[in-house]
Image (spheres, rainbow, N blue to C red):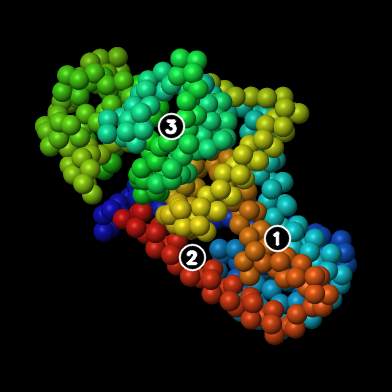
Amino acid sequence: MRGTLDGSDRVNFLQDILAMAIILSIVVFIHEFGHFAVAKLFGFPVEVFSFGFGKRLVGFRWKETDYRISALPLGGYVRVTGLGPDESTTVGAGEGTAAVAGPRWQRALIMLAGPVMNFLLAISITAGIFMAGRKVPAYRLEAPVIRTIAANSPGAAAGFLKGDRIVAIDGSPTPTWQEAEFAFSVAPRQKLSVEIDRGGERRTLAVVPRAVSKFDLGFTGLGPALPPKIGRIVPRSPAAAAGFVPGDRIRSVNGQLVESITDVTDAVARFAPGPETFAVTRSGKDVDVPVSPRQEAGVWKIGVQLEPDVAEVVERFPPLEAVRQGWRSLRTDTQATLGVLSKLFQGKASVKQMSGPIAIGQFAGEAAREGAGPFIALMGMLSLQLGILNLLPVPMLDGGQLAVIVIEGVIRRDFSLRVKERILQFGFALLVLLMGVVIYNDILKVF
């Protein structure tokens, strides 16, 4: 990354910030509104409804509630009288510690309401997208029949053959490439049991996806036949200097026919350091483009982002079916997220797979530049992630406070306010440490 930003970089940077602010504002508001609404339903006074933590910047008071925007915008809280110490106590919102009042089951429902609202927002967005229709690559809805195997890849080493149909991965059915690709991508360095159909005979092969890219995604080298084209060109890269154009469809490299993205990457590595001649089709004309790859982190690259040149189909459902598909998608994404979190806690997955505010800002900006559909879809995904993460039994999160309420119910007495404050402080320290690690990884990804 360059030390200074040019005009387009600055515009993209501002777009990233604005897009992230819009998404966080909506998903956090929905989350906190859940706490707020259920607290009001049970007659608990609400002292503060804040977007952000820390010092109050602006706001207004209506009845007993202070509606405010605070200095640290990455989150928010509702301060409800009767719930006892909460995140606002730990991060210095300025109020004194509130006493505990009200039945435990009511307090538990108030804490649960935030994540539930995030789940409802996620399924509503997903169902809405299914009703409106979304464009997806046609192959992702097709059966996962292997047509390409990258040279020296984990898939090649595991013994997969072209024509094998992937039936299940670690016991989970994979009816389409969409499920198979996702299962491989979230399991870098993990031994996966893959059931295949080879000429009508069922077999099971073991494969360990290789960790690739700055996001530590799993790569097996297995895929469908996807004609490669250039989607994005990295500024000041060999490809930019050579004169490649987004949309160029690559036919061959040094005379070797390429039929997939993996064929291109294999050919670049095989003929490096070059120079290499790419035969491409550009606006219906055949063009030869000479380029010399550059080695980065031990990998030969020309500086392009390859995309499959495949047909897209519109996936659209009537209202009831859209809701069912939305629920199915929500359930699948939840299971996948919990699986990744489980592997993180077991030390079987890398923290690099987690994204912090910098990476989320980049995702949000890219989604916004692609259009309203991808932007709204990302909002639904982040709402789901927020709901899941808040249910983890970590102090400072809703799940941590729910765990305290459950323990209090088991022992039939409430912890003292001092003990609850210490629990929250411990949780706050853990979250600050985790956020520091995630932001550090975000910075490494950017640079």
Q: Secondary structure at mark 2?
A: helix
> Hey, what amino acid is under mark 1?
Glu
Q: Earlier in the sequence, mark 2 or mark 1?
A: 1
- Circle 1/circle 3 CB separation < 8 Å: no
State the mark number for residue 390. Answer: none
Locate residue 84: give its quadrant. bottom right
Of 268 and 278, the residue lying toward us: 268
Q: Which residue is mark 2?
A: 435
x and y percent of residue 292 in the render? 14, 35
**Disc 2 versus disc 1: distance between alpha carbons?**
21 Å
Question: What residue is rendered at 79% in x and 78% in y?
Answer: 414
Kindly identify which residue carries mark 1: 32
The mark nearer the N terminus, 1 or 3, is 1
Identify the disc placed on residue 205.
3
- Relative vertical location of residue 300 with respect to residue 9 in this rendering, above or below: above
Q: Secondary structure at mark 3?
A: strand
In primary-sequence order, the first of circles 3 and 2 is 3
